[in-house]
Image (cartoon, rainbow, N blue to C red):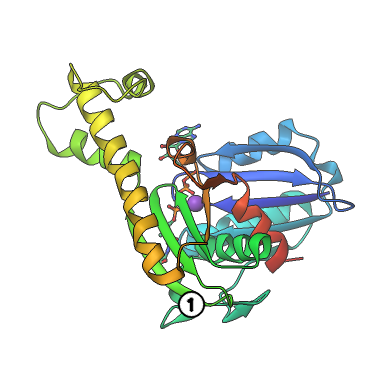
Amino acid sequence: MILELDCGNSFIKWRVVSDADGALVVGGIAALAVDLLQDLHNADISTITRCRMVSVRDDVETSALTDVLSGELGVEVLKVIPAKRVAGVVNGYKEQDRLGLDRWLAIIAAYEMCKGPCLIIDLGTAVTIDLVDCNGAHLGGYIAPGLALLRGQLLAHTRRIQYDPALSSVALSDITPGRDTAEGVERGCLIMLRSYVTSQIGIAEDHLGKNFTIYVTGGDAALVADIPRVRCVPDLVFRGLAIACP
Ligand SMILES: Nc1ncnc2c1ncn2[C@@H]1O[C@H](COP(=O)(O)OP(=O)(O)O)[C@@H](O)[C@H]1O
Ligand SMILES: CC(C)(COP(=O)(O)O)[C@@H](O)C(=O)NCCC(=O)O
Ligand SMILES: [K+]
């Protein structure tokens, strides 16, 4: 079995897949390494023979997690490293090492799936947008705050916007004008996010023409999954991880 990890700024997504056919065995989300280890102890980790990881956390945290995992599992942790070209995709960043490795993997996976022009949207801590042309050339992209950051900044920097975050799902039930603070903030931020995604699809047409595939992934992908032409691929980064670290 192979343990795969996608260490984002908010959550560590993990899953165990069969090394025979890549079939999913078990998976989960952990905020901290200690939670991840607890999850793994609850799962049957004795069968893990390989481990591969992508991390956008800082080097200290990433190395600490790598050390703990290799100690616990007794296997080497393969980490994704920056590259100019993988699986027909050419990194479009001026300095290839600066492109977020989660973005890089999502791009690689998307192009592998469609072998054509594509727009890749990852709604996580940040919302990242990446464009790939018909030849696999990464054109670059955009970075904006994700929903939790939008909400969090209002809660942190205003005196009178205070509400229980547990209300957010209730407030998101529809997008009619909010009639309390939670509805106002949650619906305002959701409309910003959706409008941003829709406008990025328009911008992509200027660079990719009309016939490009739109892939969406990340913890908040469900919030835009109904936008026309959007294809939701929750494990897009993991698909790229398997390509980059076979
Ligand atoms: N179980 C969850 N708990 C909290 N937030 C969640 C959960 N699942 C999805 N989310 C949403 O997903 C976002 C994080 O998505 P994710 O793609 O994991 O981020 P990252 O890759 O940046 O760590 C959060 O900001 C939140 O809005
Ligand atoms: C933009 C990101 C923070 C997104 O990470 P996430 O929201 O998945 O935690 C990450 O891709 C990153 O650290 N990128 C480095 C900067 C760049 O891509 O230009
Ligand atoms: K992510």
Q: Position of residue 177 (x, y in %)?
A: 20, 23
Amino acid type at circle 1 is Asp
| Frontmost residue, 18 versus 70 | 18
Vertical relation: 4 (above or below) 157 = below
Q: Measuring 84% from the left and 42% from the top, which residue is drawn there?
A: 46
In the current view of this chain or complex, which residue is farthest to the right?
A: 20
Q: Position of residue 36 (x, y in %)?
A: 61, 40
Q: Measuring 36% from the left and 17% from the top, which residue is drawn there?
A: 170
Residue on which disc 1 sits: 97
| Frontmost residue, 36 versus 246 | 246
Vertical relation: 21 (above or below) 167 = below
Q: Is residue 17 visible to the viewer in this orientation of the structure?
A: yes
Q: Position of residue 179 (x, y in %)?
A: 18, 16
Q: Measuring 48% from the left and 36% from the top, which residue is drawn there?
A: 222
Q: Tag 1's secondary structure?
A: helix
Q: Position of residue 204 (x, y in %)?
A: 40, 63
Name the quarter where the C terminus is drawn: bottom right
| Left or right of 90 in this view: 182 | left
| Frontmost residue, 208 versus 144 | 208
Q: Is residue 8 visible to the viewer in this orientation of the structure?
A: no
